[in-house]
Amino acid sequence: MKELQAGIQLVRTKCIQLNRHPVFKKKVLEAVAVKPLPQQTNVPQKSLLSFPASLPPHGLRQRTVQGLGELKHQAERINQLSAELEAAVFEFKAIASEVNQDWKALQAMQEKTSAAADICKYQAVHLPIVQQKSSGSFVLASRTLDLFKAEREAKILAQTLRHRAKRKRYKG
């Protein structure tokens, strides 16, 4: 029993919705306040590509260090926005999952059929990421977001718990 409770707790921490039956009370989703992204109006838009030939090495070094700092800041900003976008995608998926139950029920009542289409279809999702190599150079790449990882882990966990419960019944 303790293992089952631990498994349920693990599933809940992974944000997998349990008890989807209409008898259970649905949670109310709260509105999320969205702040506009800060505009960088105080940063002068100078081109780093302008390369005056008469610039002394000290000035060139200073401008390079400043440019690298700006690159690092922008890389951190892109990675932060990517993390926020990932959270928003998973929130979208959770909302779609809840709405999908009602959507299918409505379609079944209207069309008198049980084969209702899902409200949302999912395709591969890629998010941007900026990485810095040991040499100091930057790599702008993308990473694939696994939308169904939590469901697979929950399925494996449920199978494991069922298997353990079955073994205990045979032993006991």
Image (cartoon, rainbow, N blue to C red):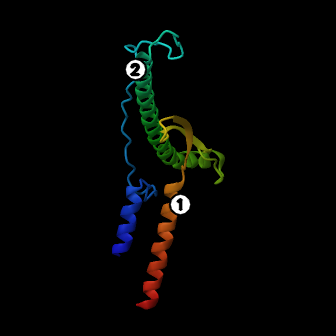
Q: Outermost residue toward the bottom?
A: 171
Residue type of the residue flagged with mark 2:
Gln
- The mark nearer the N terminus, 2 or 1, is 2
Percent across and percent down for residue 20 are: 46, 56
For the C terminus, the image quarter is bottom left
User: How far apart are the two marked residues, 2 and 1, measured between alpha carbons?
Assistant: 51 Å
In the foreground, 109 or 27: 27
For the N terminus, the image quarter is bottom left
Q: Is residue 93 left or right of residue 111?
A: left
Q: What residue is rendered at 39% in x and 29% in y?
A: 34
Whether residue 61 is situated above or below residue 24 in the rendered picture: above
Question: Which secondary structure lies at badge 1?
Answer: helix
Q: What residue is rendered at 48% in x and 73% in y?
A: 160
Residue type of the residue flagged with mark 1:
Arg
Whether residue 8 is situated above or below residue 1 in the rendered picture: above
Residue 152, numbered label: 1
Whether residue 67 is situated above or below residue 167 in the rendered picture: above
- Is residue 159 visible in the rendered structure shown here? yes
Residue 138, numbered label: none
Percent across and percent down for residue 114 are: 64, 54
Whether residue 78 is situated above or below residue 167 in the rendered picture: above
Res 66 → quadrant: top left
From the image, tell me which residue sits under label 2: 62
Q: Is residue 30 left or right of residue 141?
A: left
Percent across and percent down for residue 37 are: 41, 24
